[in-house]
Amino acid sequence: MGRKVNGIDLVPVVLVLLFVSGCTSAAHKLAESRGAQASTYLQRGLYLEAYEVIEYDLRSSDPVIRQSAQAVIDRVPGFWDHLFANLALSITRLSSPPDANTLYDRISRLYDVPSIDRQRITQLDSSLQQQVVSANLTGQIPFTVTSDISRFPALNTASAKSMMFERSVTILASSPASSGYDRYLLRKTMDYVDQEGRNTGAYATLERHLDQIPISTGDLQAIVAPLYPSFVERTLRTLALKIFLTTDPKKRLLEEDVASKFKSKSQLIQFVREPAQDALEITISELQYEERVDPERTQTALVDNLQVAPLVAVLTMPRGASFLYDGTQGGAEVHFAYGIRATQDGKVIFEKLLREKLGDTYYYCSNARVQNVYGGLSGASFWPNAQVQTFCQQGRARVDVTQLREKIPERLAAEISSIPVIANTVARVK
């Protein structure tokens, strides 16, 4: 048992003290390492980089760490003058809201360093506040309605917010249809308009640009409709698309299968059974269709005991036993060619030849088993050697010609989806 003083076991206490001492020693060594790194930066005249390394050490609650960091600074005459000059230069070079917030936080933390003149920090903070207001107006720092401006009270003015709003509208209006728009930015822009009111310039400004934003039908109804119901109704009506799909020679099942592929793509697409003046007419002409099926052939392969990997033979197989498995080969292919033509208002707007081959030959392994020297068989769940394992794992599952046929409507639907007027409608559904 450990020694006790006043009923307290000294062994755990000593262990805790040793642990704390070890942690403290490690922390001091890390601080020394950071000090050495900061000194290296200072030798190169990189004052801001040096400060970044020991910034938290200067405010540490540990006096040893704090004094060590202060000693690094004290060895450089005019360190704070250089640092403040660097920070002042950083203010003029700001180019993004996150960088402005980061610099604000860094300047604010200077107040916790006892050796700094607080008035100089206040002057630096004032310069930053003035810069963000000016840079917001010029666009050097492109604040938007989604930017965090909580650190900059001067940006809470009507003129500053109006600039952020107009910039947000510009960003949304220039969003490429291929990569989409920022949904959060759209929502916050709508919130700004809602706060301003319907009979305001902000409402009219956004209304003029809504047509330029590739807003999905879901967001049109959820985000835009409460403020711009007429625009949403008109847009959905414009996006709605009637399609008259026909085949040559006539194949009703193919028409139904292709049309069904669009049900999950867009509710705005409606297939009609008769030609209509306002419908997009698509004709699928079958130019070639051939099927080839190679009947499956199964052969048993034997791996002699001498060909089995030595470790496998020792651990999993009886002495002198052989390994057997069935190798099955077959094939199925579908060769097809279809002409796709789209006509709108009596004009051909799309024409393409789709010519492909689906399927191929295949093989797979099955029924692995071990045959002992007396002819007895037992199932095997291992491979006899690396060669057989690689061969079997590279095999492919059975290819069924029926499955290949079912892929044709998918390929046709994919090509039809690329017709610009259809692609635009599909892209707006999210």
Image (spheres, grey):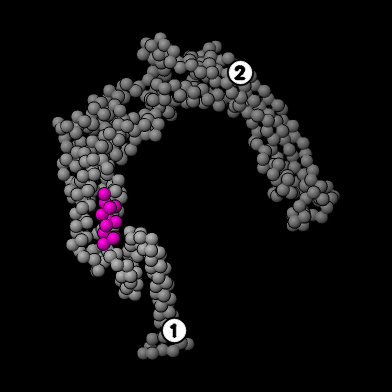
SS at circle 1: helix
In this picture, which residue range is highlighted in magenta? Answer: 81-92
Badge 1 amino acid: Val
Residue 324 lies, in percent from the top left, at: 77, 44
Q: Residue under circle 1? A: 11
- Across and down, in percent, residue 118 comes to 20, 64
Is residue 52 something that shows in the picture? no
x and y, in percent, of residue 253 in the image = 52, 18
Q: Residue at x 71, y 41 (%)?
A: 391
Rendered position, 24 above or below 302: below
Whichever of labels 2 and 1 marks the residue nearer the N terminus, that label is: 1
* Residue nearest the viewer, comparing 326 with 2: 2
Give the image quarter of residue 421.
top left
Q: Is 364 displayed left or right of 79 in the figure? A: right
Return the residue nearer the eye: 373 or 109.
109
- Considering only vertical position in the picture, is 148 above or below 38? above
- On the image, the x and y values in percent for residue 143 come to 26, 43
Q: Residue at x 20, y 46 (%)?
A: 133
Residue hosting label 2: 289
362, above or below 136, in the image:
above
> Could you give the CA–CA distance between mark 2 and mark 1, rounded to whole angstroms?
88 Å
Q: Main secondary structure of the magenta part?
A: helix
At 26% from the left and 51% from the top, the residue drawn is 91
Q: Residue furthest top?
A: 346
Residue type at numbered disc 2: Tyr
Query: Is 420 included in the stretch rendered in magenta?
Result: no
Compared across the picture, whether 398 is left or right of 259 comes to: right
